[in-house]
Image (cartoon, rainbow, N blue to C red):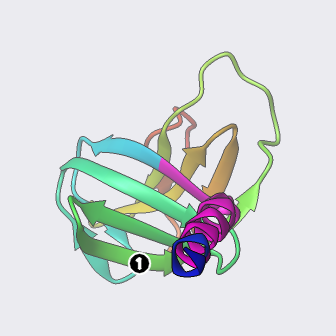
């Protein structure tokens, strides 16, 4: 009987701690309509799951359970309010390479950081 109580108590503790461990992880499904670079990794166009861990400031792009790309990012409030919220922002360089800049995560943006080469933003409608 005592063993059963110990096992039940262990399950209760695990159940209570699991939400706390996952609280800092935000998840979103994203469809890239073009191949995009995330850091040094080329992510092919398609459907992916994006996870942002607030504790480690890590953004992970997954294809199913396979990690496709991982990079550091920071979470920021949007600077302007808009009725339209894009799922992600990219930037194209002069060679046509598309680099991922940010992904919208629950009203905030996970900013990956601008690449070293200057280019024109390609997904927010601004002129260079």
Comparing 121 with 101, the one in front is: 101
Q: Quadrant of residue 79?
A: top right
Res 115 seen here: no
Q: Residue at left 60%, top 71%?
A: 5
Q: What is the x, y in percent for residue 21? A: 64, 69
Q: Quadrant of residue 56?
A: bottom right
Comparing 69 with 3, the one in front is: 3
Q: Hey, which residue is sitting farthest front in the picture?
A: 1
Q: What is the x, y in percent for residue 128? A: 55, 48
Q: Residue at left 70%, top 76%?
A: 55
Instruction: Return the residue at label 1.
Output: 70
User: Could you say whether the residue bearing mark 1 is in a helix, strand or loop?
Assistant: strand
In the rendered view, does 64 fall on the left or right side of 77? left
User: Relative to 53, is 100 above or below?
Assistant: above
Q: Hey, which residue is sitting farthest top in the picture?
A: 83
Predominant SS along the magenta part: helix
Give the residues drawn in magenta, as a range: 6-27
**Is 9 contained in the magenta span?**
yes
Q: What is the x, y in percent for residue 92? A: 39, 57
């Amino acid at each position: 009987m005592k063993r059963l109580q110990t096992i039940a108590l262990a399950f209760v503790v695990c159940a209570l701690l699991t939400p706390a461990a996952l609280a800092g992880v935000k998840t979103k499904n994203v469809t890239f309509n073009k191949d995009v670079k995330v850091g040094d990794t080329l992510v092919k166009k398609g459907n992916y799951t994006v996870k942002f861990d607030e504790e480690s400031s890590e953004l992970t792009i997954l294809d199913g359970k396979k990690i496709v790309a991982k990079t550091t990012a920071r979470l920021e409030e949007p600077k302007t309010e808009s009725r339209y919220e894009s799922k992600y922002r990219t930037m194209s360089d002069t060679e046509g390479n598309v680099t991922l800049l940010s992904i919208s995560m629950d009203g905030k943006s996970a900013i990956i950081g601008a690449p070293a080469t200057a280019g024109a933003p390609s997904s927010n409608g601004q002129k260079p």
